[in-house]
Amino acid sequence: MQKIFDISIPVSSETVTWEGDEKVRLHRVLKMEEGAQFNLSSLSMSVHNGTHIDAPYHFLPDGATVDKIPLDILIGPAQVIEVKDKGTLIGADALKSAGIGEKIKRLLIKTRNSDIWKANPNEFQQDFVSINKRAAEYLVDLSIVLIGIDYLSISPADNFQSVHKILMSAGIIILETIDLSEVSPGFYDLYCLPLKLQGVEGAPVRAVLLQG
């Protein structure tokens, strides 16, 4: 029997957001305990809140929007690697030594970020782990089609555009804010389906890994 790992974080009014971004607003408009005939809820949030994908249009004016991403990029075999460096930037050498499979096209990077989802999930952490430009260039060389990381951004906070642009210029889809705390390094099947939002640069997803 296949084991299913839900690598999406919960979405609520407490969900951590990038500093300065719109907070998630999730509330019930109608409540049965107050006499309504049914419960009805309302949700307002950035398309980059919670577990989400970044489409190339996020940083490239002519890049693909979410609704134009082929589904076969978002579904298929994937590898989870773990990088245990104590620093905040992952370089190409760390990726080269992580044992990335020769034919892997979807790669998820597990770091110490995943510990945040258990310890302090609702507060933004400035010292999160991301990748540097050399690492992004190496992923392009590997012909990766989807890269995921276990915090809000794959780019460092002080150089937000460069890594995104390198990846997106190669058509790589970025999956951010995943929780890999219960996932061991290895090979899985990834299912990562965004809302079919038209003409936008990102969308929330429910991402799961299947093993076995």
Image (cartoon, rainbow, N blue to C red):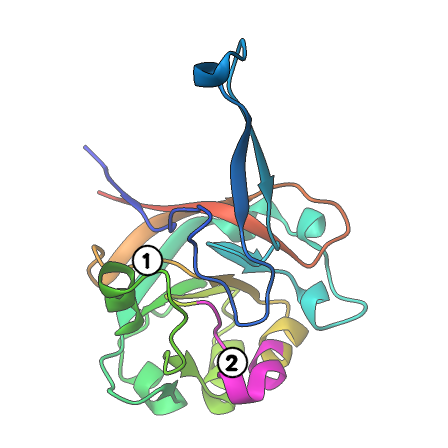
What's the residue at 73%, 59% (across, down)?
Answer: 64
Indicate left or right for 59 with 9 as reference: right
What's the residue at 47%, 54% (across, down)?
Answer: 50
- Is 11 above or below relative to 22? above
Along the viewing direction, whichever of 184 and 122 lies nearer the viewer? 122
Could you tell me the amino acid type at mark 1?
Answer: Asp
Indicate left or right for 15 with 64 as reference: left
Indicate left or right for 191 with 61 as reference: left
- Is 155 above or below relative to 39? below
Residue 104 in view? no
> Secondary structure beneath disc 2?
helix
The quadrant of the rendering that contains the C terminus is top left
Magenta residue check for 58: no
Foreground tag (1 vs 2):
1
What's the residue at 25%, 86% (across, down)?
Answer: 85
> Secondary structure beneath disc 1?
loop
Q: Main secondary structure of the magenta part?
A: helix
Corner quadrant of residue 118: bottom left
| Residue at image mark 1 | 179
Instruction: Report the span colored magenta.
Output: 152-164
Sequence order check, earlier mark of 1 and 2: 2
x then y, percent, for residue 148: 43, 64
Could you tell me the amino acid type at mark 2?
Answer: Asp
Residue 32 in view? yes
Along the viewing direction, whichever of 22 and 32 lies nearer the viewer? 32
Magenta residue check for 153: yes
User: Could you say which disc has been placed on residue 141 in the image?
Assistant: 2
